[in-house]
Image (cartoon, rainbow, N blue to C red):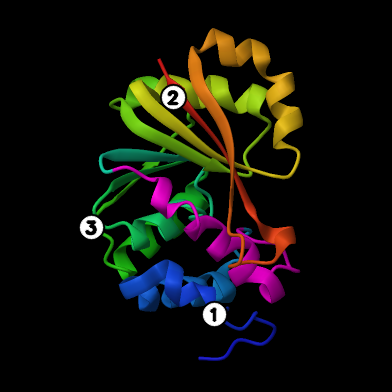
């Protein structure tokens, strides 16, 4: 179906989603249809929904390991639902405190037949609710000095944080030096993903670190 104002599917989408592109399209359409009314995306996002949100999330898929991966503040399902579509070999735990968004995530997991998704209504700080995770991701949640203290405790020793950040990530790392030491993070790096796939302005930056 055609939705007024929705960005046409970029050429890179089929490459990133591979055999799962139809589910990627179905999720994008659902988000375009209902995202604004449910408060999941802003009113100006349709013309850049694929590039800024869907592909931005999909670019992280190759960094995801097999095992249990938590998505903190999953919200609209970015990146959690997108990653679960592309990586059916991974178990995803979508952690979201708001009831309306939890209902959306559960609906998408059901309609897209994502057997690898569990949705948990909780704040990330309630880490005792979860078994230790192999990796934790988050997108557009908060600055690293605030985000690391709520995500690192969810990860098993030797697991990873894979946190999606903006262009200011290097500055955030500088301001988060104390919490990086406090939570025993090592092998800290920033990865820039999407060159040649998305416009330079929409490249995905990922803060990745091992949790000891």
Looking at the rendering, in which quadrant would you find the C terminus?
top left
**Which comes sooner in the sequence, label 1 or label 2?**
1
Mark 2 residue crowding within 10 angstroms, few (<14) / some (14–19) / many (20+):
many
Residue furthest out toward the bottom: 1
Local SS, label 1: loop
Quick one: label 1, few (<14), some, or many (20+) residues within 10 Å?
few
Picture coordinates of residue 125 (x, y %)? 49, 23
Percent position (x, y) of residue 195?
A: 61, 60
**In which image quadrant can residue 153 be found?**
top left
Q: Position of residue 152 (x, y in %)?
A: 47, 22
> At 66% from the left edge and 34% from the top edge, which residue is drawn?
142
Front residue of this view, candidates 68 and 75: 68
State the separation of the CA atoms marked 3 and 1: 28 Å
Is 5 positioned to the left or the right of 18 in the image?
A: right
Residue at the spot of label 1: 11
Distance from the alpha carbon under mark 2 to that under mark 3: 28 Å
State the residue lying farthest toward the front. Answer: 196
Disc 3: which residue: 115
Q: Nearer the viewer, mark 3 or mark 1?
A: 1
* Vertical comparison of 10 with 211: above or below: below
Label annotation for residue 210: 2
Q: Secondary structure at mark 2?
A: strand
10 Å neighbourhood of mark 3: few (<14), some, or many (≥20)? few
């Amino acid at each position: 179906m055609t939705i007024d104002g929705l960005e046409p599917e970029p050429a890179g989408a089929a490459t990133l989603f591979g055999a799962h592109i139809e589910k990627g399209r179905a999720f994008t359409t659902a988000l375009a249809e209902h995202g604004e009314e449910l408060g999941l995306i802003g009113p100006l996002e349709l013309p850049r929904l694929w590039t800024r949100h869907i592909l931005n999330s999909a670019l992280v898929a190759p960094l995801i390991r097999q095992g249990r991966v938590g998505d903190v503040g999953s919200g609209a399902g970015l990146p959690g639902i997108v990653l679960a579509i592309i990586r059916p070999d991974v178990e995803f735990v979508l952690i979201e405190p708001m009831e309306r968004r939890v209902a959306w995530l559960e609906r998408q997991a059901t309609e897209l037949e994502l057997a690898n998704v569990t949705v948990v209504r909780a704040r990330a700080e309630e880490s005792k609710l979860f078994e230790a995770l192999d990796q934790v991701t988050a997108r557009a949640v908060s600055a690293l000095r605030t985000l690391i203290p709520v995500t690192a405790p969810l990860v098993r020793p030797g697991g990873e944080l894979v946190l999606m950040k903006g262009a200011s990530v290097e500055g955030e790392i500088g301001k988060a030096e104390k919490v990086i030491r406090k939570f025993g993070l090592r092998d800290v790096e920033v990865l820039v993903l999407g060159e040649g796939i998305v416009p330079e302005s929409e490249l995905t930056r990922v803060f990745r670190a091992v949790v000891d």
